[in-house]
Every structure is written in C-alpha cells, then in structure tokens.
Image (cartoon, helix red, strand yellow):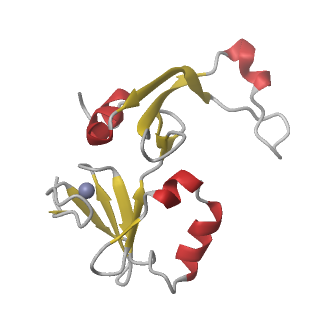
C-alpha cells in the first residue's frame, strides 16, 4: 500500500493518507483504527456537525494531535461486506465490534424494504448473529473478519 505515514495518534507507520481535494486530506490508521481529516478542527463546521451526531463513546476517546486535528474511531459500514465500529459501555471496556453482511433470501426480501422507494428491497443485511469483538490493537483482524483485508 502506498501513502503510508506515521500515525499521529498511535505512532505506528500504518496510517493511510488520501487526498480528497487539494485542501482536504483524510488519515486512516490501520494500526489503531482511528481516523481524522483536515476538517476535524475546532473552528470547522464539519467538526461541529460530527460532535452533534457522534455517540458519547466516540467523543470520550477523541484525541487532538499536535496539528490540531481531532482523531476518532473509524466506523466502517459496507452494505455487502459488513461493518466495524467502536463498541462498549465506556472507554475502559470498549472494543471493536465486527458484523458480517448476509445476502437476503428472495423469499425474505419483503421484510427489508428501501425507505421511500415503493417495491424496492435491500439485497444485503447486517447479520447480527455474526457479531464478534476484537481488542483495540486488533483493528486489522476486525477488518479481515468482514473481508475488507485478506486474512
Ligand atoms: Zn494509529
């Protein structure tokens, strides 16, 4: 993988940088599972919007780096693969949770209508029976579990 840099949150060298535009970069670390971008600064509207929608747990573990960027846990939600999110009742017991997606059977489709679209149904659902916890340091294993990274 190219564009790997040192992570300002955990200091590993597994931070993947994507340039979304000439002024905006996104940093996603595979070491600690945290992410930030150029708009995660205290005076940015984007940052303030995040504060309004993020779960308390995410806010509890936010980390401001030396450049003033605030890092938070990554949430991955891929309809055909699964999701990975930071989960727990407090930051002391938080872990990564991973859930696999499952194809919806033809005969069950009617149970999964797409909101606002008459006669259209989802093809995939999150299969909560597959939920599995991973320690904080095992973010990459959680990704492998839902098939985002090779095992
Ligand atoms: Zn990191």
Query: Left of 5 or right of it: where is 77?
Result: right
Q: Which quarter of the figure has residue 6?
A: bottom left
Foreground of the two, 100 or 96: 96
In the rendered view of the protein, which quadrant contains the C terminus? top left
Residue occupying the far top of the picture: 107
List x then y, in percent, for residue 11.
17, 60
Count of marks placed on residues:
0
Residue occupying the far front of the picture: 92
Query: Left of 129 or right of it: where is 16?
Result: left
Q: Residue at x 55, y 75 (%)?
A: 46
Q: Which quarter of the figure has residue 133?
A: top left
In the image, residue 103 sits, relative to residue 42, either above or below, namely above
Q: Residue at x 37, y 75 (%)?
A: 69
In the image, residue 122 sits, relative to residue 66, either above or below, namely above
In the image, residue 84 sits, relative to residue 35, either above or below, namely above
List x then y, in percent, for residue 39.
45, 78
Q: Residue at x 53, y 74 (%)?
A: 47
Query: Left of 113 or right of it: where is 20?
Result: left
List x then y, in percent, for residue 51.
58, 68
In the image, residue 145 sits, relative to residue 85, either above or below, namely above
Ligand 1 image-quadrant field: bottom left
Query: Left of 114 or right of it: where is 7?
Result: left
Residue occupying the far bottom of the picture: 43
List x then y, in percent, for residue 141.
28, 33
């Amino acid at each position: 993988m190219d564009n790997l840099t040192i992570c300002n949150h955990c200091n590993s060298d597994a931070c993947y940088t994507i340039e979304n535009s000439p002024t905006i970069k996104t940093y996603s670390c595979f070491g600690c599972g945290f992410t930030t971008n150029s708009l995660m600064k205290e005076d940015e509207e984007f940052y303030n919007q995040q504060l309004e929608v993020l779960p308390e747990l995410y806010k509890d573990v936010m980390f401001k780096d030396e450049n003033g960027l605030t890092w938070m846990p990554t949430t991955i939600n891929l309809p055909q693969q699964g999701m990975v999110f930071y989960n727990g009742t407090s930051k002391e017991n938080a872990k990564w949770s991973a859930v696999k997606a499952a194809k919806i059977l033809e005969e069950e489709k009617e149970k999964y209508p797409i909101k606002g679209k008459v006669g259209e149904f989802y093809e995939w659902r999150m299969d909560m029976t597959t939920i599995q916890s991973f320690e904080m340091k095992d973010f990459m294993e959680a990704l492998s579990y839902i098939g985002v990274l090779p095992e």
